[in-house]
Image (spheres, rainbow, N blue to C red):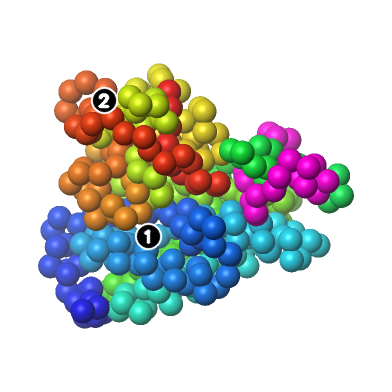
Amino acid sequence: MRPTLHAFTAARRFSASSSQRIVVAVGGNALQRRGERLTIENQLKAAKDMAPAIASLAKEHEVVLTHGNGPQVGELALERSCAPFDVLGAESQGQIGYILARAFQSIGVDTVPIVTQTLVDAADPAFNTPTKFVGPVYGAKEAEALAKQLDWTVKQDGEYYRRVVPSPRPHEILQLGAVRALLESPANVLVVACGGGGAPVSRVFGDIVGVEAVIDKDMTGALMGRSLGANGLIILTDGGGIWENFGKPNAREMKRVTPAYLTGVKAGAKFPGSMGPKITAAIDFVVNSERPDAWAAIADLKDAAKVFTNEEGTMISKDIGGGDVIWHARPPSDPTPPAEDGPDAVAK
């Protein structure tokens, strides 16, 4: 039986005494299953599968949902090669926001997507070193030909190649007041904001102008969480939490870990296009939050409801009750390799 809006509202109010404010970030690839075409129908199907896990969190906590847009903005860029990336980013927010709203409304969760602008520094050195993967994957020869023909920068992503664009650090969310107002309103709506990291803009002599970039959605999620005074940041992937010795017979997954430990072992360094930015965003949120008990979690999308019990995924906080890392008590496994643009695992 599908939950109704009344049940959604009642559950949230019933648990208000223990509720937390949480930013939940899902990857753009969560709406594109491996091997499937990036059609609206396929994305809607994936969103409907994803919605109950997020709704279960929103029943008990104040949730702001943000999402990636790598596959979608890349497809839009292929269709409209003359459009600037800030416009394409805004278009992808509208497209994905509508798909998510349909999925959540279908299970009785009132949802409000906001097209959001994120301020970046026009002099950010990231503009000189593109790193953000967008669009489909290509073989080496095809990628090389496209790079020459379209003046793209391409980089290896696993066994394939993809286009990369600049990904500057977010500094300010211009629609934060609207997000806060909706979050604190009596309407009990699920807010979707900062999709794709937000449409990238900069201030030039007082004017707001678009810039050619795609901002990392997890870094913007961390910024939004700190700006809203959130208790936690949850980054949902399709491959679990943070692993040591990823891909090896003795691989093991972290259960709880401190930012200091992750920084010390350079976790995520071997996966700069997937898990690396997620770990950086989680550390950034925990370390720079005004809340001393701020936490972040990285977990599989299907395990969203188990994050609070720490049954699944990896929880990051300054104090984990002694020591710097606690491991899941599981036998060694052979985790699934990272998906393209996919947040899957980390080796130190």
- Amino acid marked by disc 2: Val
Residue name at image x 23 percent, y 73 percent: 8
- Whichever of callouts 2 and 1 sits on the residue coming sooner in the sequence is 1
Residue name at image x 72 percent, y 60 percent: 77
Residue 67 among magenta residues: no
Viewer-nearest of discs 2 and 1: 2
Residue 333: horizontal and vertical position, in percent? 31, 34
Residue 244: horizontal and vertical position, in percent? 36, 27
Residue 229 visible in this rendered orientation of the protein:
no
Residue numbers of the magenta segment: 125-146
The residue carrying mark 1 is 64
Left-right relation of 23 to 167: left
The residue carrying mark 2 is 325
Residue 251: horizontal and vertical position, in percent? 34, 28
Is 110 above or below relative to 164? below
Q: Nearer the viewer, residue 45 or 212?
A: 45
Left-right relation of 96 to 48: right
